[in-house]
Image: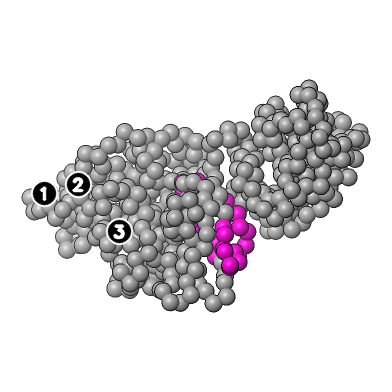
Amino acid sequence: MKRYISILLAVVMLVSIAPTAAFADSNMTASENIKLLIKSWEGCVLRAYKAHPSEEHWTIGYGHYGSDVYEGMTITEEQADAYFEQDIKAFENAVNRWNDKYSLNLTQNQFDAMLSLTYNFGTGWVEYYDSWRLSRYVQAGFKDGYGNRISDLELADSFGVLCSAGGEILPGLIVRRINEAEIFLYNNYHTDNTNFVYLILDAGAGTVKGNRVVIYYKGSPYGTLPTATRSGYTLSYWKDTKTGSAIYSSTVADVSRSLVAVWSDGSTPSGMCPLGDSCPSKSFTDVPASFWAHNDIDAAVSNGLFKGTSATTFSPDIAMTRAMLVTVLYRLGGNGEDVSGMENPFNDLDEEGYYYDAVLWASEHHIANGFVDGSFKPNDTLTREQLATMLHRYANYMGYPTDVYSDIGDYEDAHDVGEYARESMCWAVGAGIIKGLTSTTISPKTSATRAQVATMLIRFAGSML
């Protein structure tokens, strides 16, 4: 939104009219990339307008705002360009001042991102508004109170909340903030390819705890959804206002959404499980309805893929073992196949073990292999690359299409993927089964928990279930 906070206007005018010589020697300047983006975001309007009813002053050209613009004023495109270059210099001065004052050592893309935000939001947002997290992060050199670097997601979220005018949340501004965060974090000037999506929350007669705009990694489960309160009511779930679908912590954050709270007054069962008393996981005390993978665990349990570790526990955070996964795959596709005639090629299997038949079946069909010492290591922790490999082989065994691949080279730890697993990991990422643990790491050697595997299997199984 244009500089709708009128108290900043004097600062903007002073800087634009009399740029100081202090910046002359070491100033950074806007790249052509960011100039083009700012122009595309602002648009060029040759007749004065008010960008929002709450604005004090009029706007013209590429977002030129101030007391020198008046109702009914018109300009040419050449004049709009001149205003734009004048404004850019003022905002370059402001960002350079912060760069020096807070010893930020900004790179070009980071400078550009802050310049774009400042062009849109005014020059006072860093030094005069301590209540904004991003302002505090700038003043602290993009570190938290303990000296740690701010995470990518937290930084994107702190960009995203600067998106309102006159108390109204503007989705277009959230998109711009995400684009600016991507420029800052990843040197990504392509606005159609973001790592993040947003939620806009409407609690109705209730109150959202925290911000009404929240940023998430794109393609991963939400994991945690904001809560809300309302006197005499319980929050049952959040509903997508566009599709009417219930959104849970296990829902994949694939698109940006606006959500509205659905409340229970006690006359209907509260809680977030849509299956109510028929909830397959209701006996598991460690999988409450609010747990991020609850719905996927329900699907896995109800289809016989997973069982509890006891009558009352699912143990969602326990690391999956190799034996556990082949047992699940045997249930999914083995259909009770007789293994009595299959050879046991491994030297460490317990014939009385729960997994014995499943391992023989998986070995017979080249779904799971052992190690060079002749062992299978059934109780070893399952890694993410082993999971991808077994699922890929299983899909080929079942005759499912496996021609969707993704280049994983953008992950900074892609070189850690074992040679045997590289094709399978590219397939699993391309098929949307495995996501990066962060936007930059695929973590191939990290163990996979029972909850994570349940979620991945439901993504994989899709229409088979």
Picture quadrant where residue 415 is located: top left
The Cα atoms of the two marked residues, 1 and 2, are separated by 9 Å
As for residue 347 lying within the magenta part, the answer is no
Can you tell which quarter of the image residue 426 is in?
A: top left
Q: Which residue is mark 3?
A: 300
Q: Is residue 60 above or below residue 436?
A: above
User: Which mark lies nearer to you, 1 or 3?
Assistant: 3
SS for tag 3?
helix
Q: Is residue 64 shown to the viewer in this render?
A: no
* Cβ atoms under marks 1 and 2 closer than 8 Å: yes
Visible residue check, residue 234? yes
Q: Nearer the viewer, mark 3 or mark 2?
A: 3
* Mark-to-mark CA distance, 1 and 3: 28 Å
Residue 228 is situated, as x and y percent measured from the top left of the image, at 56, 66
In-front residue for pair 389/125: 125
- Specify few, some or many for label 1: CA neighbours under 10 Å numbering under 14, 14-19, or 20 or more: few
Q: Tell me the kind of residue under disc 3.
A: Ala
* Residue 199 against residue 38 in the figure, above or below: below
Q: Which residues are magenta?
A: 201-227
Q: Secondary structure at mark 1?
A: loop
Q: What amino acid does circle 1 point to?
A: Met
Q: How many marks do you count on the picture?
A: 3
Which mark sits nearer the N-terminus, 1 or 2? 1
* Residue at the (34%, 66%) spot, across then down: 275
Percent of width and height locating residue 74: 80, 29
Colouring method of the image = one colour
Question: Which residue carries the number 2 mark?
Answer: 363
Residue labelled with disc 1: 342
User: Residue at coordinates 29% horizontally, 62% vertically from top-left?
Assistant: 301
Q: Is residue 224 magenta?
A: yes
